[in-house]
Each structure stands twice: as C-alpha cells, then as structure tokens.
Image (tube, rainbow, N blue to C red):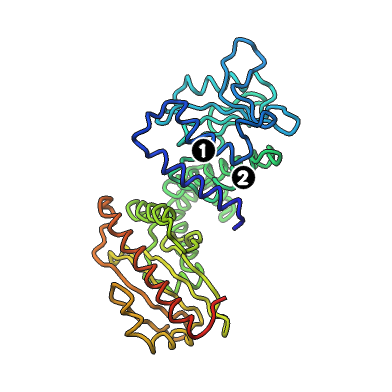
Amino acid sequence: MNDRYQELKTLLENLDEKRKNKTIKWHEEDTKATLIEPLLDFLGYSRQDRDALELEGKPDLEDNKKVEYQLLDKNREPIVCVEAKPLHTDLKQKKIYNQVKNYFNNSRKLKLAILTNGYEYRFFTDFTDSNMLDSEPCFEFKLDNITDDVINFLLHFRYGEIQVEEIKSFAREKIYYSKLREYLRQQIKSPDDDFVTPFAKHLFNSASRSNKGIIRRILPNIFTELFNLCHANDESENQNEGEIENIKTRKGKVAFFNEFKKYISMEEKSRLEFKPPHSNGSYLTAYEKKYNRNQAVIRLKYFIIPRDKKIDVRINLVDGQEIFDLLKKQKNEFESKIDNEVTWKSPKPNKKTYVIGCSKDNIVFDNVDKYEEYFDWWFKIGHQLYDAYQHFIAHVHQIQ
C-alpha cells in the first residue's frame, strides 16, 4: 500500500469525523472550508493556486449560473467542475442537478462534473451524448463508506496527473458491474424468456415452451449450487476457519464489522497496520510479520462468529509450532498480561495454523448501543495479545 493511498484514506476518515461536529452550523462556506477544500487541496487543487483551481468558474454563456470550483489541467483549461452544497443537502433534488447540467452542457470543455455536500459525492460525465451531462451519476460515494475503489478513483484526479479516459473507463466498468449484477440477481430469482432461450437451444436444439420451462425451473438451483461450490473452494485459510459464518448477507453483522473498522482505524495510539478484510467479510488482519528462523507467519486477527454469537481476537501462527511451543512454556506469565481467558489451540492433522486467542460471548450484533462496549473489548484484548506476544518473543528471536 503506497503512502499516497494511506494518506488519502486517513484524510477521508478524518473528514468523516469532522462532519459529525454538531457545534458547526454547516452553512455552505463551513462545508467548503472544513470538508471539501481539504480534499481538493490533497489532490493538488489549492485555493491559492490559480493555475490548478478556478473559484466560481465562468461558463461560456453569460447568463448561466456559476459553480464553486473548476479543476484545471496543466494548460489551465477547465476539465472538471465542482458544485458544492451545504452538508445535509439532498443532492438528488432535480434543481440542483439541473444547475450542474446547464453549466456542464454550456461549457463544452468540461469532461466531468462533481456534485457534493461534503459528505456525499456524485460524479457525472457524458457517456450517452458528447458534451451533454448524463442524468445518472457514473460514480458516487459517502464519507462513511470508503472502499478501495473510492480511494483509487479519487487518486486519478491528482493535479497534473488527471486521467480522464481512465476515470471514465473505471466508472463505466462499475456501472456495467452494477447493472450486470442486478440483472443476474433478477434472473436467478425468476429467469425470463430472453435468458433461458439460449440455454434451451444449446442443450435441446429447441426453444420450445416445455424446454424453456425446464430450464426456468432448474436454473435457480444450479446458480445456488455453483455459488456454494465457489464458496467451498475459497482460500485454504477460509476453509481452516470453517466455523466462520458468511455475514455478507446479514445486515446487522455487516454494519457491526464496518463500524469496527472505522472505530479502530481512528484510534490514535494504534500500532497495528490494518489490511483489508478477507473476501467473506468475517475477519480483519491487523498485524502480519515473518518469523526469521523458519519463515512462520504471525497474524493478529479480529473475528466475527455469528453462529456462536461471539467475537474473537487471535494470534494465528502459520507454520508456527516453534513459536507456539516457546510461548506455551511461559503460559502463566503470558496469560497474566491478558484481561481475559486465553485459549491455546494446535492445528488439526494436515493443517498448519496454531492459535492463541480470546473470545467474548453473548454478542448482540444488531444492538448498535452495545457496539462501543464490544469494540473497546476487541481493541483492548487485541493490544494485550500483541504486546504480550512482542514481549515474550523478543527474548527468543528477533521479528523482522
């Protein structure tokens, strides 16, 4: 992960915290100065640099309304317009969209338009008709839901490095992905004639009503079987943690997991370098190092286990029998540093992950009021495990 990526991620997290400040009136000027301009400044468009940023850009037509900003290319040509509204403004209002549309359409030079209230960002371009703003955004995000895609997308806007065609290609791919995903979701539930006809022709050389009826009845089950097969063939580590339930389709658990990621990433005293969650959304890798002597991999992980209504924090030692045995010899002293019962697990036959971990039971994942209590436990025990591990292993072998 490069420095620019991490710096932008941290900035967006900080902006999300700032927008929660209830002492600010959040008029348009407050929103611009506190939430919008810090992001523009990071991307290289400072208020003080008129070669990069034009304030209240003027359109080609005299009677057209202004927008707050125009992002300029190296030739000082406008390439992106930005319309800013006060925080809490509903950006889906037609009059707000029309203001941006009229400006974009009259400019004839702009390639992209951004509509934002400092919390929500909506990006528009001209996929349908050249120089005519599309009615739907090509990309959008909110500060409380920052993904890798969001950060990578924003990094394409760096002054002097702005890559319009790559931005458009990226956005178009996301649109197609979303539309294809929704189309397939509908077809899995209830396949229509256009969808089942090619299958009937290929399998039976006939798209008769009876053949299409057979395909229509069996397709949902086939899709389900294929999904389960792909899930079962996931990474070996995911197989080793078979008790982890897939929580993507369970809204309460997803909300809990996402809130924890935001909570822990804002902890100023954290010494843990977080990596993205595994594809099944069930755990977060917080720390990973190689152990010199036998190249064992040490990972500190935070787990959600919905089936058992509990959360775990564990040190996973992959190919780590030597480390595990050394630590276990000092078990009592090690456990005295942890404010929780500690479990020590050796791997099953043909497996290679040794586990030292702690659990908290009776978790109510949908109870938002309890999140802070759960997060505090998770974070505290994670730090204690990390510190205890570092303390004892430092006396035996140096960690790279």
The residue that appears at 45% across and 29% down in the rendered structure is 30
Q: Name the residue under label 2.
A: 155
Residue underneath mark 1: 140
Mark 2 nearby-residue class (10 Å; few <14, some 14–19, many ≥20): some
User: Farthest residue toward the left?
Assistant: 362
In the figure, is residue 357 to the left or right of 28? left
Quadrant location of the N terminus? Answer: bottom right
Residue 229 in view here? yes
Q: In this view, does 82 lie above or below 245?
A: above
- Ranked by sequence position, the earlier of labels 2 and 1 is 1
- Rendered location of residue 364, percent (x, y): 25, 58
Residue 126 appears anywhere in the view: no
Q: Nearer the viewer, residue 127 or 51?
A: 51
Q: Residue furthest top?
A: 63
Q: Which residue is drawn at 42% across and 74% down?
A: 315
Q: Is residue 94 left or right of residue 205?
A: left
- Above or below residue 331? Residue 145 is above
Image coordinates for residue 245, horizontal then vertical, percent: 37, 64
Identify the amino acid type marked 2.
Answer: Leu
- Secondary structure of the residue carrying numbered label 2: helix
Quadrant of the rendered structure where residue 76 is? top right
Q: Residues within 10 Å of mark 1 (few under 14, many from 20)?
A: some
How far apart marks 2 and 1 lie (CA) works out to 14 Å
Q: Is residue 153 above or below residue 136?
A: below
Residue appearing at x 60%, y 54% in the figure: 3
